[in-house]
Amino acid sequence: MSLSFEIAATSETGGRRGELSLPHGTVQTPVFMPVGTAATVKAVPQDVLEGLNAEIILANTYHLYLRPGHELIRELGGVHRFMSWARPMLTDSGGFQVFSLAKLRKITSEGVEFRSHLDGSKHFFSPEHSMAVQIALGADIMMVFDECVETPASWERTRDSMGLTHAWAERSRAYWTEHRGEVPWARASELASQRVSELGKSEFEGKHQALFGIVQGGMYADLRKESAERLVEMEFPGYAIGGLAVGEPREVTREMIARTLEFLPKDKPRYVMGVGYPDEIEEYARMGVDMMDCVLPTRAGRHGLLFVREDPMDRTSAVVRMNIKKQEYAADQKPIDEGCGCPTCRRYSRAYLRHLFACGEPLAGTLNSIHNLSFYLETMERVRGDLGRS
């Protein structure tokens, strides 16, 4: 089997404590997944991620297709071997990245023609091509190719876009069904390093990737319902809620998640894509979302923005955003967050971190990102503990 999902406990608010079993390991849910766009979580080494107990990370289909190329990664044994990551991984379909290239793309029913943001070269992504690239990459979970509609968008524009997403989901599923046994790690590449030799044929032979459908429908509850019901008919192993956190108010995001969850299977994993701040991911997890990802922990860290608790000794207290660039931290010998046990807080002071940032030292982004990732992962660990006692 490519995926199994067991729910151990549920709460009155809909939150679920579960376990997601994948070819490369088991993931405790609800889970936050660090984003590794180009087969790297920016500025944070893989061994550090393991130390933070990141159980699953993301890679980006669009970026890896352009550089270094999916065929090269296939030849090297897949993205796990390529980046020396032995734990589960998920790849997106490239749909959101194509969406972000609004001035460089042309969408038809067949797919999307776009120009590379790197060199302007012309490329074409169809649902089938997205599946082929993701199979070459070999992550445990792959996503259907979808179209993400802009915000704001009319009901008619959103409906038409949703229809395209459904047609592409059917085509994605058909290609995946036919080719899903072709993952690189199923062929036991001889190029595997000793570091990840456990990814060999004996452990994974006969297993394959899982494919998730993506619910669209913009900010319209009736379209979200229709999209969820249509995708459930296609019987995917899991379901994502896409097209959120694209400029809409937070209360709208929450409403669309809540309205969509009503129509997704309770026995399959449910994933909200591209959200959000720490208090948001906690809220969504307690509503019944099993998986979330966001670039915010590392992006904020690289810009000197750190997440801390209002009361460091109370890990349920409000989230506060600390700007380490401020002069007030120049001689501050305290750690970022006195209640945090991450490697950055255990060793370094606010004064030192501010100094690194002021000097433009790359280490600043690394240490800040480690703390923020730890903050997110700690938040989900606490939520899992609460849900496990429900």
Image (cartoon, rainbow, N blue to C red):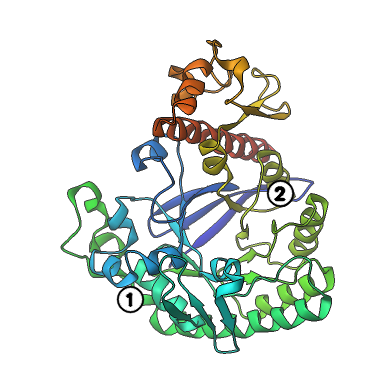
Mark 2 Cα shell of 10 Å, populated few (<14), some (14-19), many (≥20): many
Quadrant where the image shows the C terminus: top right
Residue 345 in the image: x percent, y percent?
A: 49, 21
Residue 279 in the image: x percent, y percent?
A: 70, 39
Return the residue nearer the eye: 210 or 331.
331
Q: Are marks 1 and 2 in contact (CB under 8 Å)?
A: no
Return the residue nearer the eye: 357 or 309.
357
Indicate which disc residue 284 carries: 2
Mark 1 Cα shell of 10 Å, populated few (<14), some (14-19), many (≥20): some
- Mark 2 or mark 1, which is nearer the start of the sequence? 1
Which residue occupies 55% across, 89% down?
110
Give, as a three-letter code, the residue at label 1: Glu
Residue 383 in the image: x percent, y percent?
A: 65, 38
Return the residue nearer the eye: 116 or 379.
116
Quadrant where the image shows the N terminus: bottom left
Q: CA distance from mark 1 to mark 2?
A: 35 Å
- In this rendering, the answer to whether 292 lies above or below 98 is above
Give, as a three-letter code, the residue at label 2: Tyr
Residue furthest toward the left? Answer: 190
Asked whether the viewer can see residue 166, the reply is yes
Residue 120's image quarter? bottom left
Indicate which disc residue 28 carries: none
Describe the element under mark 2 as helix, strand or loop. helix
Which residue occupies 38% across, 68% down?
66
Left or right, 13 with reference to 292: right
Left or right, 190 with reference to 161: left
Which residue occupies 55% across, 58% down?
5
Please name the residue that numbered disc 1 is placed on.
Answer: 182
Left or right, 300 with reference to 231: left
- In this rendering, the answer to whether 39 lies above or below 115 is above
Asked whether the viewer can see residue 186, the reply is no
